[in-house]
Image (spheres, rainbow, N blue to C red):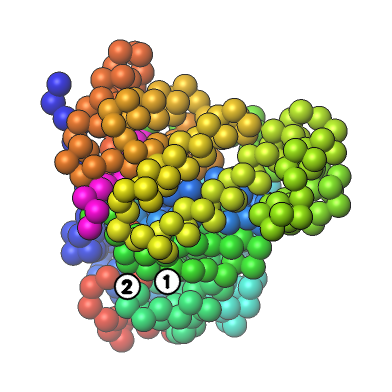
Amino acid sequence: MTAPQLVPAWTDEEGAARARSLFTRAFGVEPAGVWAAPGRVNLIGEHTDYNDGLCLPVALPHRTFVAVRPTDGPRAPARTLRAVSAQEDDGPPREVDLVTVGPQGGTGTVPGWPAYVAGVAWALEQEQLATEPVPGFDIAVDSCVPFGAGLSSSAALECSVAVALDELLDLGLAGPPADPDDEGRARLAAACVRAENEVAGAPTGGMDQAASLRARDGHALLLDCRDFSIEHVPLDLAAAGLELLVIDTRAEHRLVDGQYARRRQVCEEAAALLGAASLREVADAHVHGELELDAVLARLATDEQRRRVRHVVTEIGRVRFVAQRLRQAPVLGGWALSVVGQALNDSHESLREDYEVSSRELDLAVAAARDAGAYGARMTGGGFGGSAIALVDADAVDATASAVARAFAEADLRAPSFLVATAAGPAGRVGPPRSETGRAR
């Protein structure tokens, strides 16, 4: 069969042109500028973020682009957000009164995807990053981050809006992508998390926003979710003749039945039983030889608790292990490549058996990639659908993708899609500097 086509990442020029064109068609004027933020894929460290653990995401070259212009003048509605997206059918702009925006479920609920945009404006005020009310603005969105694939398309949207408003409102937090202000970007990331949690009503632990705003080109981001400190860990797969193939199973996340919330609850209950503030404390004590994992598990009340805790503790250990191997050998090869691949495999088995967040499609993608020669493969993201990753030789990308596609066809499943993840840089402006017409008034 013909090798499946990989989902391409747009160049900054292409993405900016798309967003700018959509903006002018929708609003009849030029935007103040275009900003972009990457999606992310998590190399390892799943369901560790809300347990104060460690994770190792990589910013994707696939980005969400937003063209933005503050509204002003006598004809502009006061503090109104008008938003259009290339990812939905043509129609009039969505309108949101920024004065009334509030948490999901209350009187200020914002329906649909504009909640991720309006939520950032709201959170900047709530976090007192914007000392004056955020003015009304028009925004046009276009994106090559696959939607619903577990690659953080929502965080890419939030973070692109955050860096746009940061510049337009002269907040001075982000700095340019080439010389980012990490402290300021950490504050913007926290605002984006609050926007997603409260206004969009979606659970997130902060990994996605940190990766989108704080990543560095050519590096994975070692994120400590206890204090949100970071370390940039070199990741140069191309130099080793390797690629990270992302397999979008196109099976949508199945979190509507509360499975994500249930796992978080069980972890919190288990930590309380163990006298710990979070399972990170247990993982640290285990790695330092202060606790035996089997003895810890024996203190828990149910098999469900034991399996969830075993995954979290061992997954945090796998993050530490992979980060250390990359520090020692950023150009993976030989033994280091073998053990990193095995860590990916072990992570998937733990997520499938102990955390029970895999799916038929994810298991099939992982198995087919391994059978095709991948050094390691695992589901990535929250699970119950979404994407898997496979560490493969660069010249085996097409063959691996074909093998996975063939396995899906034989199982009578919807055809997956594929992209290649390279460690990209963070959110920021794309295109020329703003003009005075772009300045918020």
* Apparent side of residue 102 relative to residue 324 in the rendered image (left or right): right
Task: Point out the image quarter for the C terminus.
Answer: bottom left
Q: Which residue ends up furthest to the front in the rendered image?
A: 335
Per the image, label 1 sits on a secondary structure element best described as helix
Name the amino acid type tagged 1.
Val
- The residue depicted at 22 percent of the width and 58 percent of the height is 239
Residue 229: x and y, percent?
57, 70
- Magenta region includes residue 242: yes
Separation (CA) of disc 1 from disc 2 = 7 Å
Q: Are marks 1 and 2 in contact (CB under 8 Å)?
A: yes
Task: Point out the image quarter for the N terminus.
Answer: top left
- Front-most of 330 and 432? 330
Q: Which mark is residue 163?
A: 1
* Apparent side of residue 6 relative to residue 369 in the rendered image (left or right): left
Look at the picture and state if 362 lies above or below 177: above
The stretch in magenta equals 239-248
Q: Which mark is residue 429?
A: 2
Q: How many marks?
A: 2
Look at the picture and state if 221 lies above or below 429: above
Look at the picture and state if 413 lies above or below 240: above
- The residue depicted at 53 percent of the width and 31 percent of the height is 349
Residue 218: x and y, percent?
32, 64
* Apparent side of residue 298 relative to residue 146 in the rendered image (left or right): right
